[in-house]
Amino acid sequence: MAGQPAPSTRARARRSIVTVTDLTKTFATRDGGELPVLEGINLDVQPGEIVALLGKSGSGKSTLLRCIAGLVTPSSGTVYYRGKPLQGINPGVSLVFQTFALLPWLTVQQNVELGLEAQGIEPEERSPRALQAIDLIGLDGFESAFPKELSGGMRQRVGFARALVVEPDLLLMDEPFSALDVLTAENLRTELLELWQAGEFPAEAILIVTHNIEEAVLFADRVIVLGTNPGRIRTELQNQLPRPRDRNNPDVGALVDEIYGIMTDRATTEALEKGAEPESGVQHVMLPHASVDGVAGLAELVLAAGGQSDLGDLARVLGFEIDDLFPIIDSMTILAFATVEAGDLVLTDSGKQFAGADIQDSKAIFREAVLQRVPLVRRIERALRHSSDGTLREGFFLDLLHNHYSDDESRAQLDTAIDWARYAELFEYDAAHGEIRLDQPAVQSVSG
Amino acid sequence: MPARGVLRARLTPIDIGVVVAVLVLLYVVVRVGHGVTASFSPHALQHVSTNPARLPYDAVRSLLRMFVGLFLSFVFTLIYGYAAARSRRAERVLVPILDILQSVPVLGFLTITVTVFVGLFPHSELGLEWASIFAIFTAQAWNMTFSFYASLKSLPRELDELSRSLRLTRWQRFWKIEVPNGAIGLVWNGMMSFGGAWFFLVASEAITLHNRTYSLPGLGSFVGAAIAKGDLGAVGAAIGAMFVLVIAVNIMFWRPLVAWSERFRYETTEAQHAQRSVVLGILARSTWPRTVGAARARVAEPLGRAMRILGRDGAEATVTPARQRAGDIAFGVVIAALIAFGAYEGLHYIATTPGAGLGEIPYCFALGAATFGRVCVLLVFATIVWVPIGVWIGLNPRVAQLAQPIVQVLASFPANFVFPFATLAFIELGVSIDIGGILLMALGAQWYILFNVIAGASAIPSDLREAMDMLGVRGWQRWKRLIIPGILSSYVTGGITAAGGAWNASIVAEVVTYHHTTLTAYGLGAYIVKASNEGNKAKLICGVAVMSVYVVVVNRLLWRRLYRLSETRYSL
């Protein structure tokens, strides 16, 4: 965008409640380097719209939300509230937490009044306002109850009441329904949308962070998809479908499929792009956090369905959300057991073999696949064979991984690699001493 | 009892630095109290009445002291814990100090603090009262402070985000979030250390200063006078009164408080062993809660508004890393300089005071080795005897329910009450106090091991035990594979407390009197008592410092390592 922004853009900027410009958030690694969680984020939220931030776990979406709320300071870039850059907490937003964050030693009314009390409002004024918010959210009669007495759904309602009673410009929601069971979440979602539609909603706009694609499509006017490692905005989708939206509606289904396709296709391309590094460096295909059981189970399921299955259907049948399903899909793609085509998961030949074989055979197939396609395992195996006694401490590999991942993620990568390799009978692992050694029979059977 | 999560296992330079700093602090205190003559005339010990009719009055006086000490500990906890958790720089100094104060035998300081307080309140009993209260305070404050500090550091992230996003006032955040979050730990630690404080109460009610003994009205001095007169009946009556007092405070105060503090549990599931309290039930049904609540609300509102001047949470404070580091360096240099200067002065004082000299230091270490030997023997025997019993009790829930309050009372009961009987036995049987002292020290310290092992054993998950049953794992194998790993962390907690209690007890157990006979053991405790009797402050500092070094070093090298092991390899 060179030169003067177009008049419509300027008008849009003037109107927007929150604007994020070129936001980057990094954190420091052990050896003093910096790993980006978010990179170059540009977005805005206009009054009267609901925006959904969609992404896998680790995509930085919660961090982005907290940057907008002013709880976290970005490493570079700016967050504007009504045209002014943020200094400290964003005065025009309030937050709904995934785990409700209710104070168990206060009653419902006291919890709801908390923000008003902090603003210095007298009890005579804040009490009726709180009661009104509690009534709005459907908890009339529970004012003097303690959170312990309430179910999960009711607790989150208190969270909503507390956030809405201060009449924010923008309501921020951090996966508000993911700690609730499916039915309660559905109910609460519907009620919230009804309130929004009715036009008396205390906030002007909503920004919701979610990892449930269906939820994003049912809820939002705009869906922003974030990538992982680093988190960049992959796509922004407009969703002009009329409300109330029904998940059985084919348009809704199509949009859900489209988003599934976006999220899986890009993941595969990214993973394979990173894999092709020269011998000297450490190749890194970021291993998804999936267990072998998960991979095997899904493969068998898809095989039973004829070798091909729609992703959205799979998610619904299994009751899985992105964070449960995608790691398994990514694993299958990395191991070349399956591919994703047009929103469908399609088993390859080796995938079909793997799914149909008995334990010993499937282990052999898995071993082949892991050695061929997972560079980290190959590297570990090579290093072990070159060591004097076939044993190496895990710290050695953790240090290598620290160049590319955070402490926790390095640990997770190594754990996943060891888990897969142990199943494949390639390595043995001594957790007490943190040592990896070659599985003796494997020494003979695996060649160069 | 050290709170979890704040233990370090290695002896770092800063630990040594802080030991030196505590020595310096001690020296400063002594210098302040130096030259103050105890120019007043409270009752000498012989004139204390041992009429059992005085027992209720004495009991109330003792109780009053305990609760004033508790209140002061609470206030100290809130301030110190908050400062350590909030300020990075203060934390680096305050936490190690606390760590070491927790290990240092407090009774050794007693004569010094008495001198100071008596100097502040000449011609009245208040000095002695404050000295006694101070002793009680030191028994309780460190545990509670550690617990509060740990709870502040482990505040759930979403509560912190909630407070900042709603921009609660600092006052609001402290009273609505931070203190309630730490409430359960505070109450629990308060209760545990209150039990230990009875010992200090008794030890501090009759104090020997310049070879004269002064006493305060209270159960401890009652017993002391009865011992001096050889009136065993009065001693028995006092022991009975003590039991009643300990149990009554437990039922009327602590158990309701623990039950009430359950409301502060920040977890989605209820605690498994919710404390029930009859007293709390009665109170809840009365109109008291409502009137208290209404009164509190009327005060809290304007107070809260007045405290808005302290500022609101969530304001941005940008500090560049460079400036921070510069500030840290300056701070570190100042502290190091102070410690070095003080250490030099202290050593100089020891070297130049007549009757002392730098040669005392290795002598103290030798004596310390003897006391250390006693502590070791005590711990080994307590382990061999009480661990199996504790495990048996813990694995039987019905027995545990009965036994736990009894053991709690036994742990709270000040062992020094029983000393005269033991001393009499030693004199009659001709047992040397060098050996007998171990028994005396054990009387106070071993209960902590028992108590913690019971708690640890009852926490072993029942499904693990059922699995062992099904697989036919019995006897030594069961102990090796399940029970010992299962109770290890509780045992270590009990062991640390028992060892600390034993060191403190050595100061009252290595020199015991009955009637006109005094038995003196070869050990550091006896050295400290002798030094304080003589009024030789330099020797006193030397003795206490050496004892502190012993405790801290063993703590770091042995107990913390075991604790680390139990937390990583053997955690359930």
Image: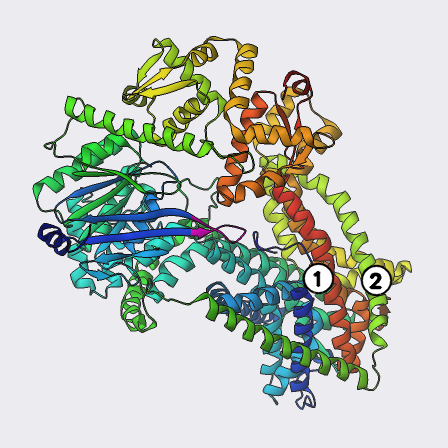
Q: Which residue is mark 2?
A: B369
Label 1: state its secondary structure: helix
Disc 2: CA contacts within 10 A as few (<14), some (14-19) or many (>=20): some
Label 2: state its secondary structure: helix
For the residues carrying marks 2 and 1, which lies nearer the camera in this image? 1
Residue with the most extreme right position: B430
Asked whether A29 falls inside the magenta stretch, the response is: yes
Asked whether B325 falls inside the magenta stretch, the response is: no
Say which quadrant the C terminus of chain B sits in: top right
- Residue A59 is situated, as x and y percent measured from the top left of the image, at 36, 40
Report the Cα–Cα distance between label 2 and label 1.
14 Å
Disc 1: CA contacts within 10 A as few (<14), some (14-19) or many (>=20): many
In this rendered view, identify the residue nearer to me: A1 or A312: A1
The amino acid pointed to by label 1 is Val
Considering only vertical position in the picture, is A389 above or below B140? above
Chain on which label 1 sits: B
At x 27%, y 55%, the residue is A110
Sequence order check, earlier mark of 2 and 1: 2
Q: Are marks 2 and 1 in contact (CB under 8 Å)?
A: no
- Going by the image, does B486 lie left or right of A314? right
Residue B300 tag number? none
- Residue A421 is situated, as x and y percent measured from the top left of the image, at 57, 25
At x 83%, y 81%, the residue is B357
The amino acid pointed to by label 2 is Ala
Residue A289 visible in the shown view: yes
Residue B287 visible in the shown view: no
- Going by the image, does A13 lie left or right of B319? left
- Going by the image, does B429 lie left or right of A86? right
Q: Which residue is mark 1?
A: B552
Boundaries of the magenta span: A27-35
